[in-house]
Amino acid sequence: MSRFNKHIIIVGSARSGTSWLSEVIARQFRYRMLFEPEHEFNTKKGKLICDKWLRTEASSVDANRYLKKVLNNQVDSDWIGQISNRKYKMHLWPFIPKKYIIKFVRANLSAKYLNENFKVPLIHIIRNPYDVLASQQRVKFPWLYNLEHFKQQKDLVQVVKENFKFDLIEDTKAFTPLQILTVRWCLENVLPLQILEPYQYKHRIVKHEDLRNDLDLFLEICDEFNIEPLPNIEKEYQRPSSKTHPKSEIINEGKDSSKFTVEELDEINNLLNIFNCNLYPRIQA
């Protein structure tokens, strides 16, 4: 049996619904959420794993040591603990949490390693690129537009070149911000879900669109992962996450705020075609 049988890892690209899903689960009494321990700037050692393609313990001893501390609930900061009950530091008491929910947005490429090496159940949530990119453009987190961590990994650059005939270093030099966001989405989703070998330990890959529209699907996942849903789950399920942008269509129901120009759609679709993305159909102008 895994020593981390009280844990669930949730991964997905930024703005894919990771916060919403994590919060719906972690609002349960005595559930402890560790919020984005891979954050490059808001955590002390998150840079060891953000945007990294970890495959073996030897690939990064320091990263592996940090991940063990994360899984053992031995790291904390205002960022990591922001969704937890921090009164008297109860979230760090080892006998309090019934469940640990660990949420990542920059660990898709390392998710397989986390899932298999540490034997931690994992939920990978994916959302269509058009909504993700529109949402990322609204929040404009600077790190979203920075592909340097990917480019510095020679093996990753080579895998991208071999599979897509795309040079991650050279071909992105003159890219627009939207093109950079699209490349990031492809690296975080197409690569792990279409190219790399699938997860081997307990996992579930679920689409945000399916999950948001089907409470029964969520309850099915709760049963599969031994999650206790909130007593008022029907109401809580409709509640936006704490990270939902004020201009999001989730809050402004019925308002389509994710339209792209013809030129922008061409930019997105051209890259989705280069990366042979079959996860979602193309939206045409």
Image (tube, rainbow, N blue to C red):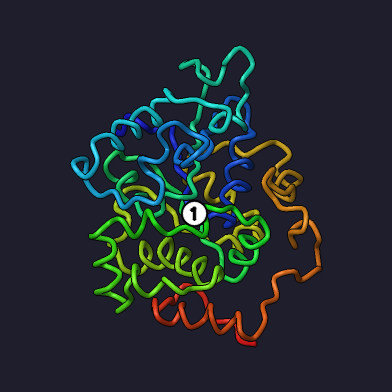
Q: Give left or right: position of 29 versus 276.
A: right
Q: Secondary structure at mark 1?
A: loop
Residue 78 appears at what percent x and percent y? 58, 28
Residue 215 appears at what percent x and percent y? 65, 54
- In the picture shown, does residue 251 fall above or below 69? below
Residue lying at the far front in this picture: please name it: 174
Quarter of the image with the N terminus in it: top left
Amino acid type at mark 1: Gly
Residue corresponding to mark 1:
12
Residue 58's image quarter?
top left
Quarter of the image with the C terminus in it: bottom right
Residue 72 appears at what percent x and percent y? 39, 26
Residue 179 appears at what percent x and percent y? 51, 72
**Residue plotted at (23% across, 36% down):** 61
**Residue plotted at (28% across, 61% down):** 156
Task: Between residue 216 and residue 96, name the one nearer to us.
Answer: 96
Task: Between residue 242 and residue 225, name the one nearer to us.
Answer: 242
**Residue plotted at (43% across, 63% down):** 189
Q: Residues within 10 Å of mark 1 (few under 14, many from 20)?
A: many
- In the picture shown, does residue 124 fall above or below 272? above
**Residue plotted at (63% across, 48% down):** 20
